[in-house]
Image (cartoon, rainbow, N blue to C red):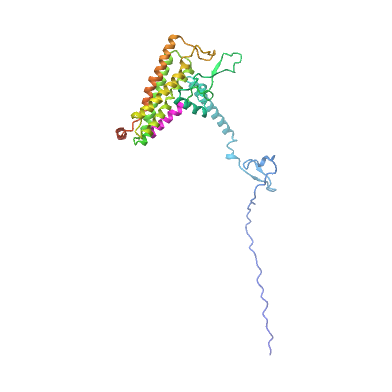
Amino acid sequence: MQRGSYAPPPAHSPPLHHPVPQHVSTVPMMRSPPPPQSQSNSNYGSPYNGQIGGGGAGGGATFAPAFGGFINDPTAQMGYQVGKTALNAGQEYMEQNINRYVSISALKHYFNVSTPYVLRKLLLVLFPWRHKPWSREQRPSHSTPADASNYYFLPPRDDINSPDMYIPVMAFVTYILLSTLLAGLRGAFHPEVMGLTATTAFVVVLLEILGLKFGTYVLNISNDSQLLDLVAYSGYKFVGVIVTLVISEILNRGQGTGGWVGWTVFGYTFMANAFFLLRSLKYVLLPDSSNATPAGSGMHTVARSQRNRRTQFLFIYSYVVQFVFMWILSRQDGSPAQIKTAAGAAKGVVGG
């Protein structure tokens, strides 16, 4: 019996079945916002304003307003208005109270300076010997064209002879910082140096202003602008004191303002400051009746007896008072004895 050939049936792979998700998740399609089409499209002015279309039939993407809509909240707007009103009222109250003693508009005049003016004024304070003229420039007031007798002084930036308060204030602060720096370079620094220096300078300025106030009362100077001029002129001595400290420190090699070098520099700066004050204050305290002084300019001639009293006051203030105050401010000794004394005083203060 003969068997037939047996051929195995062809192999068939089982059919592939892909997994079918049981739960359909709705994931939003992420897309970039459309580019602006024109300048007139106000909806695309900011990504925080309104709604941007183009998302399809279901609408577009929306963005929250800035700060959660806090700026547009009526309560926030009301609070802003209340705060602004309170700030304006406080500023007005301070100006009214300060104007009782000092005119703010008058002070602005003394700080109206420029860089060329500051440089020229510093040279004038240090080298006043050949400067002419010393009189201040005046211009007629344009606010009252019908009355040509009203004149006003030019601001410092337009007149080098006009006093300012920018240089005195900056020189006052520079003097305090420079004195503290020099004390540190000499090894005599302690935490109380800056406070003591600032207190000394402040007391000197306060005594000088009180003396000027008393002098204006005795000399019958009732014009507030003349008093402010005297206060401004009183601060120029700090320029000479600063120059004395710096040059003496360099030439004396850290030994302070003592010795003949210190006294020589101090003598020059003192004489320059005294001459500068004598020539400048002459037109404030002693108006010249021979000159053609415009009417209404605030510079009136004085009687002969009053003029003699003002001349004496001007001389004493320019030379005697300035010498005492400048010597107190420029007294810097870098000797080892003073360093030990300062160190011992600092230790005593800390230990106490």
Q: Position of residue 85 (x, y in %)?
A: 55, 27
232 to the left or right of 138: left
- Residue shown at the point (43%, 30%) measured from the top left: 173
Whether the magenta-drawn stretch holds residue 159 is answered as no
Whether the magenta-drawn stretch holds residue 179 is answered as yes
Q: Quadrant of the N terminus?
A: bottom right
Q: Position of residue 20 (x, y in %)?
A: 64, 61
- Looking at the rendering, the stretch of residues picked out in magenta corresponds to 167-181
Vertical position of residue 36 compared to residue 207: above or below: below
Most extreme residue toward the front, as rendered?
A: 130
Q: Nearer the viewer, residue 226 or 129?
A: 129
Q: Quadrant of the C terminus?
A: top left
Q: Nearer the viewer, residue 230 or 314?
A: 314
- Residue shown at the point (49%, 18%) measured from the top left: 225
162 to the left or right of 261: right
Vertical position of residue 46 compared to residue 173: above or below: below
Vertical position of residue 55 compared to residue 140: above or below: below
Main secondary structure along the magenta-highlighted residues: helix
**Residue 323 sits in quarter:** top left
- Residue shown at the point (45%, 27%) measured from the top left: 169
Q: Position of residue 213 (x, y in %)?
A: 42, 17
Q: How many marks?
A: 0
Q: Position of residue 276 (x, y in %)?
A: 44, 22
Most extreme residue toward the top, as rendered?
A: 304
